[in-house]
Each structure stands twice: as C-alpha cells, then as structure tokens.
Image (cartoon, rainbow, N blue to C red):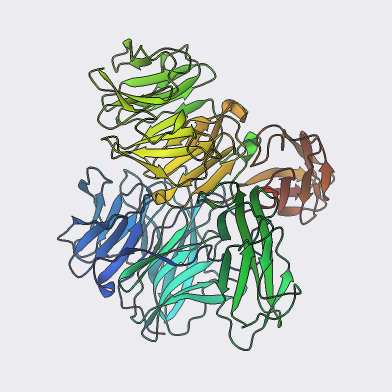
Amino acid sequence: MPSPTSRFRSGFFLVLTSLLMAPAIAHSAGPVFLGTNPVAIGKVPVPMANISGIGVDADGNQYYADAVAGRVIEVTPSGTSTTIASSLSQPLIAVDFLGDVFVADIGTGRLLKIAAWPTRTTTVLASVSKQHAIALDNGNNLFLLSGDQLVEIPDNGVPAVMATIPGAALLGFGPGSPGTAHLYILSVQNGAYSAQLYSYSTSGISAGTLSAPLRNFLPDLGSAVLEGFFVDPQGNPIVEANIAGHGKVVISSTSGYKHALYTAGIPTVPIAQDALGSLYYVDGPSLIQIQLGTVNFGVLDQAGYFGFYPPQFTLNFGATPNITWVLSQEPAGPFVEGDIQSGSGPLVDQAQLYLYFWPVFFLGYASGTLNLTDQNNVTTLSIPLVATATDGGYSSYYLPAPDLRAHPIFQPAAQTAAQTVTSRCPCGTFALNSKTGSVTHNGNEIVSGLQNVRGADVDAQGNLYVTQRGVAGTLRVAADGSTSRIATDIADPIGSAMDGLGNLYVLNGDDIVRVAPDDSEAVFATPVTNGGYTSLLSVATDLFNNVYAGYGTSPNATHGAILKFSPAGAHSLVPTDTKQPTGLAVYPCGALFFADAERGTVAVVPGYKLEKVIGFGLTDPTNLQCAEGGTISGQDPGIAGGQFVVAPTNSVYVYSYDFGKVVVGSSRSITLSAVGVGSSAFAKGPASAGAIFCITVCGGGPFLPNQSIFTGALTEITLGFMPTAVGTFGPYPVTILDQSDEDALSNYETINLSGTGVNPP
C-alpha cells in the first residue's frame, strides 16, 4: 500500500456524550443508514480539486478552504459567496455550530479563528508546526496532528501535546461514553493503516487515554490512499479514499458490511459532517447533503382509506450479484416494504428495497425496525424506521429524542434550579432561579422576588431585563445594581427578547412592541401587519437582529406558527409542525429551537428547513435559552427541578452505575425513584391508569432483577448487585420503557450496571 501523499483533511463531527441510540432502533452490527436522499443544497465556488476542506454550520452556511488560492470562502444558503480569509498557505478548516471557522494554515504553522457573523474578526490562536489534520469538538476544543503528535488547544487555551502516535495521519470524532469524548486517530506504518481511540474528559483539559490499534475497525480497501476519516454517531467508520484514481466515500461496520456512498471521477472528495448529523460532500459543481440516521419519512398528513399514495424511500445496498438479501424482521406499525410480499424472500433486483409509510388512524410518532440478512449469514443489517403522522400540512423531521420529564438520573447533566441567562455581554454569568425567584451575577444575588418570568436577557453593557407574566412593564437591573421599570404601559407582558442593538421586544396581547435603548416604544408587528396570526406565546432574536415570534393561532386552524421578522418588520413563515410554540431560542446558536407545549416537545430547525425533535415529555415549557454549541435549557413545572436541558445529539441518553467492590455472597442495591411518570410525546399530561412500564436487565449476571418487570403504576424499582465470584461484572444494560408513549419503540432509557466481587476481608 503506498503512503499517503495528498492533503489530509478531517471534518467536524459532533462529539456525542451518549453512547448509543435507543435499543429498539439501534442496529445489531450494521451501519447507520441514510435517512434522506442526497440533495444538492448549494453551488461550490471553486473547482472540486482545489478544495482542501469544507464545513457547514447550524444555519446552513457553507465554508470552503481553497488550497490553490489560499483562502476560505463562505456561501450562504441563498448562494451569496464571500471570501472571509485570504493570503493563506494550504489551509485546512473546522467549523463549529455557530459558524466560527478554525483554520490550520499549514504553510505558516498558524492556527486562526475567524469569529462567527456578524463581525467576522480574525485572530491567531497559536503556532503549531507540521500541521496536517484538524478536528473540533462541540466544546470548541481543537485537536491537531503535528507530525506524529496529537496536539490539543482547549477553548481559549494554549497548545499541549497529548500523545504521540507513530505515523499519525488523520483524526475524526465519534461517540463517547458519559462524561467523555472519543477522538479516533488514523496512522499509517509500513504501508498499512490502523486506527486508535483517544478518550478524554469533556469537563476539563487533562491527558486522556490512547487505546491500542483497533481490530477490524477500518474497511479493507486494498491499496487505497485514505484522505478523510470520520466516525458516525454509532461508531461506524466513514472513509474518504483514493481508489484507483477515483474518490470514494465508504461506510463500513465491524460486521463486515461495506458500502460506497459516493464515487467521484477525481481522486479527492471533500467531505464533512455538521453538528446535527448531516453529511456533506462535493460532487462536481454542487454540495450534496444527506442525513446520517434512521430511514426517516418525515411528516405526513393522517391517511384516508382510498386515493392515498404514501411516501416512499428507496434503499440502495449496492449488493453484489451473488448475494441475496432476505427479511428477518417485518417493519412495525404503518411501514410497508414494497418489494417483498411475504415478509421473507429475495429482493427483486438484489440491490434496492422500496419502503412505504402509510399511517392509518394514527397521529404521532411511529418507529420500527427492518432487518435484512444475506443468505450466507455473513451480514445482518438493521434499518430503523421513523415517521410522524399529523393532521396538518407542515413539513418537519423527527429523530429519536430523550424523555425530558424523566427522573434527574436520566438527564444529560445534573439539574439545578438555576438556569443560565442569555447574555450579549462578556461580563460574567447571569443565572435565573425560578424556585427562589432570583437572578445571580457570578453567584451573587442581584434581584429577588420574581414570579412567572417570561423573558430574561442581558444587553452589551451588562444590564439585565426581566419580564414577568401579570407584572406590568419590564424590570431593568443596571450593571451598577440600580433598578428601574420600562414599558410600564404593558400591563401583562407575555414575553420579551433583546436584539444586538439594545432593542427589547415585548409581547403585548397579539402585538409585538419594540422598546428602544432610550426607552421609547413603537408597535413592531400586529395581526393586521403579520398576515392574521394571533395568540402570541413567545419571542426570540438572532445574531442578525431578526425577530422570531411564536403564535398559537394561524390561518391554518389546526396549527400554531412561528414567524420570522426582519429588523424592518417584513415577515415570513418558518416551516414547522408546531402547535403551541411557548418557547423560542436562536441567539447565539444560529439555528432556531422551539418548545411546543401541546406536543410536549423541543425541536430544532437547522437552516430553517427540516425540523428535528430533540426532546419530548414537557408540559408548559418557557424561557428557552440557547448556549453556543446548541445546548438548550428551559423551565417547565412538570420537570424534576422545574428545569430541563437537552442537546441536539439525536440520541437517547445512556447512563452508568458502578456498585463498586462488594464481598462475594453479600449484596448492594440502589433505588430508582419516579421512573416513568408523565406523558406521551403526543398528548401531554400524566400517564393513564392503564400505562405499562417495562424494566429489563439484559445479559443476566449477578444483577437483580434479571428478568422483565411489567407494572401499571411504577414509581420506583430497586436494582441489586450480588457477586457470585471474585472479579469484575458488567456492564449489563437495564432498559426502561414507558409503553404508553406514542413513540415508545424509539425511546428506551438505558442504565449500564457494573460492579466488582471481592474476597471477604
């Protein structure tokens, strides 16, 4: 195998802090399938062969590193092209959720940061010699390969050598266990490629752990030169390879399955993934987007009996002629396979399978799994199916999401009563405590006695603005601690949000009132000027000072709506499937997030195109706040602690509990409280009396219980560990399912149990 001689690239992959997707839709050993058909989303501004790296942010802006001209180009979703950096020498790029672009300028050894819009300032972060690959995690920690050394540059930190890997060539992120992140490093020695896993803590900068070379991890590509290396959310490698002069993007799995997603006529195929799980590659003049994940049919109006043509997906397996695939599991629910009539048999053309989604008498989320096995039992592929049936005509998208109303042990982070307040000022941390009705600044209380907070923002000068339902006007707490009230003529403000110019937008009935920095007021929008939308529920602003408003009533009587207003007041409809959008957040993430009280969900609309549900189980969500990187927090009286946290990782969270060292023959136990009280994803409210909860300890071992438990009113369960011998046991997964959930098959919660048996003292 020849040594790699072309420019190495590494794309930005979201670091998942959860290990697996829900068991019911997770694979056996097969790869994650493409959930959308390839779609051209933009025109590439330079020849394909000139590109040394690409990236896409959450708002759909595209970024290209032009190695020949030494520049970085930004292309907006509308097609506007702007050079944001020039005079570079062989640049590589990594792009974060917000749109910050990090540039490894190989020829000069500089590492640059081009800040996100609207300022686009450029700073030099560090100097690192021999750079040849770059990657970025969702905490804005950078990783470089400098020769054979793995170099980490923490957010706002200095470079540090973390490990030495002989022959280090490429790196790419993959899934991590709770509290850790996984970085894969590709090396080449004696003409052979191998991959190693670097696991590090996401809570702080410290040396991580480097594994031995991973066996059977990389696909066998013969003498191909690997130019890009990625890992999907389930740990399957995706490689960009030069195979006999053709650029190929290949996904593989440890089961032996291998499939070329794309083949180009030239050796290089620029490729990247964004923080929301979309895969991008350059195909001649176009940038192509596909969604890694389930086979997702999106949203469909509820079906009738006749004259209805269901949506379909065609899966192209690329199966060789001597392999015949057969079904080993029928699709569940309203999914129909078109090629196989009996539920078992060969595919019609041995390469394609047509699947249909046909909801009948169904509203809400549907999930199923289709398993395909070749007749030689060499490979089994598990294809998860997800779709949503609605009673309206809006387009949206759904991926598996966590149940946010579950016990805090199932939350992605320890919940506290305090919620960080969005601030446009680099002047410390402001936090809202809904339980005590107070706001702190850097831990010191600055205001108390608040109730029913419906808006909290900090302007560029460090002044805090708080709006409360039932309390006239808006409370302003100045940076010097003095307080005053503005907009006191608004008797019952429903919510508020501040733009980057210091304008405060306050909801007053069905009107949006703009309060300028000099405290003057003007009506910004009314039902007369917005097309007839009424029942205002929420408001938010973005980096460009556009205003987003959530309405409970729209001209389509079956839905609510979210409108986007330009700073001048011109409005457009954001395509969502929302019913009651009681919470909105945009700044500083770039993408629009919204909470829907009727559906009990939190969703993201990246690029204002495909809506993705990222959490469910809410009752009355308000005060959405967005942190850079896409982590969303909000308040809800139906959530433990009154607060929820969710990130757009499209995974159900997995947790671990270690019983520690226990004497053989004795036992130790833990009790999980309030496991599964709450609602389905479609209809909020407490679980019905007929709800069934199922707890299963899979794998047996000395953990109790070791069988399924079914109950109609589960509030707690005791898990025990009774070691039968000296040594380590586990991890064994406990799966918990609320079968009253509409999307039950896609929303297990999992706890991994482990422990160690020891001799008596």
Total number of numbered discs in the rendering: 0
731 sits left or right of 237 in the view = right
457 sits left or right of 80 in the view = right
| Quadrant of the rendering where the N terminus is positioned | bottom left
Q: Position of residue 100 (x, y in %)?
A: 30, 49
| Quadrant of the rendering where the C terminus is positioned | top right
58 sits left or right of 203 in the view = left
Q: Position of residue 757 (x, y in %)?
A: 76, 49
In the image, residue 473 above or below residue 111: above
In the image, what residue occupies the spot 53% across and 58% down?
Answer: 233
- Asked which quadrant contains residue 447, the reply is top left
Between 315 and 282, the residue placed more toward the observer is 315
Q: Position of residue 176 (x, y in %)?
A: 53, 53
- Asked which quadrant contains residue 88, the reply is bottom left
In the image, residue 717 above or below residue 379: above
In the image, residue 193 above or below residue 726: below
115 sits left or right of 620 in the view = left
User: Does residue 545 appear in this view?
Assistant: yes
Between 463 and 549, the residue placed more toward the observer is 549
Between 417 and 531, the residue placed more toward the observer is 531
User: Which residue is the extreme one toward the left?
Assistant: 87
Q: Position of residue 140 (x, y in %)?
A: 37, 48
User: Which residue is the extreme one toward the bottom?
Assistant: 322
Between 678 and 172, the residue placed more toward the observer is 678
In the image, residue 42 above or below residue 141: below
User: Does residue 761 appear in this view?
Assistant: no
- Asked which quadrant contains residue 76, the reply is bottom left
